[in-house]
Amino acid sequence: MAAELHVELVAADRQVWSGEATLVVARTTSGDIGVMPGHQPLLGVLESGPVTIRTSDGGTVVAAVHGGFISFADNKLSLLAEIAELSDEIDVQRVERELEQAKAAGDESAERRADVRLRAVETR
Amino acid sequence: MGAQLRVYKRRIRSVTATKKITKAMEMIAASRVVKAHRKVQASTPYAKELTRAVTAVGTGSNTRHPLTTEAETPTRSAVLLLTSDRGLAGAFNSNAIKAAEQLTARLEAEGKEVDTYIVGRRGVAHYNFRERKIAEQWTGFTDQPEYADAKKVAGPLIEAIEKDTAEGGVDELHIVYTEFVSMMTQTPIDSRLLPLSLEEVAEDVPQGEILPLYDFEPSAEDVLDALLPRYVESRIYNALLQSAASKHAATRRAMKSATDNAGDLITTLSRLANAARQAEITQEISEIVGGSAALADATAGSDK
């Protein structure tokens, strides 16, 4: 059995996902970072972006994360985000609508949030 | 039906209606406490992980940050007071306000100027009525606070603390809120939120746990820069949630005693109503008896 790491994906108001994984890819401010079991202790600032978690049973969990932190130590990885949504929870039509609205209103941060959500759904 | 009895009946009816209302409010509050308490618990994992991360940066590097540096002579403080939008919660709001006033008096005795920030209509009304200055106020979300609300509150506060004192900034930030201890106990507490002492934060992490030497991405300063405002937000969020849960618990208790009182009142009033009805009957009987006795006397007289 491949080595595993324990992942906790928590948003400010709830625990979004937790389980065992073999690889976690997240986007920090200085670029994408992949964490596998046995990685050295790490604490980083996350950008808005999709986070990909390859679970130990071969599945993939994708989540849209908006701002937050990644911290890894003792084979335990925590992803802290103010807002985090699993790709299955995202309603594509609604997000597309939001994206158009944000574009029309020139609201850059809202546009980015919607864009990240869409990308998370696409990589699913 | 006599006048007296009618008055009692009317009062019983009105108290019964009040009792129904307070009973309903009690049950609504009871279900909201459970919900609010669940939200407090749901926010715990985030707060815990964040505390760990802050401790890790704090102990793992010697970075200085405006949010952790204590001013040598603090001259201005900000007090954030959390109250509720609605009343009918017993002494909930007045207790919180009293705690804030004591804190303000203490800070002023130490020679600091105090800026007051208030959440909740009740606190705002209290200060406005006494024509005291409020630096900033927020209302409308105290029953069910969201994380976005905590961000809204934290923003100006963090800005104020990062500004120089000479330009109207503050040196420290205190928060006064009602801690939800249990369904029966909620205590108003005040604590200093900023400047943050990393040693104090470190005490929250279980003893004996050795923190690993972290690799910071992109750098320890940047991580701390991003981390500390989030930490403050999460603390304020937690305080808002606890305050909401406490408010609902206080409402429940106040409404329960109102219901009990209404019940007592109904018992007393029905006793009185019964006595009044009995008095009426007794009077009627004595009138009849008296009347027939007088009649009997009269006929007995005419027989002779």
Image: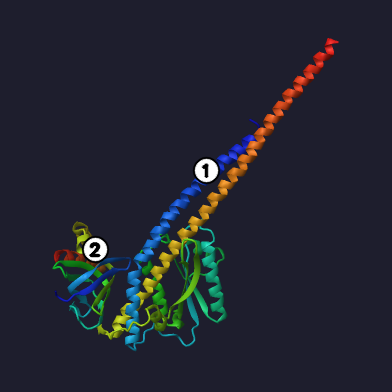
Chain name for mark 2: A
Query: Can see residue A82?
Result: no
Identify the residue shown where x is 19% and y is 72%: A21
Q: Which residue lies under the disc numbered 1?
A: B17
Dot label at residue A102: 2
Q: Quadrant of the C terminus of chain B?
A: top right
Q: Which three-letter amino acid code belongs to the residue tagged 2?
A: Ala
Dot label at residue B53: none
Q: Quadrant of the N terminus of chain B?
A: top right
Q: Is residue B185 above or below residue A78?
A: above
Query: Can see residue A85?
Result: yes
Occupied quadrant, residue B162 = bottom left
**Residue in front for this viewpoint, B112 or B131:** B112
Q: Is residue B265 above or below residue B249?
A: above
Q: Callout 2: 10 Å neighbours few (<14), some, many (20+)?
A: some
Q: Which three-letter amino acid code belongs to the residue tagged 1?
A: Ala
Q: Position of residue B71 (x, y in %)?
A: 45, 86
The Cα atoms of the two marked residues, 2 and 1, are separated by 51 Å
Occupied quadrant, residue B48 = bottom left
**Residue in front for this viewpoint, B126 or A81:** A81
Identify the residue shown where x is 63% and y is 40%: B271
Q: Is residue B204 above or below residue B41?
A: below
Q: Position of residue B133 (x, y in %)?
A: 52, 70
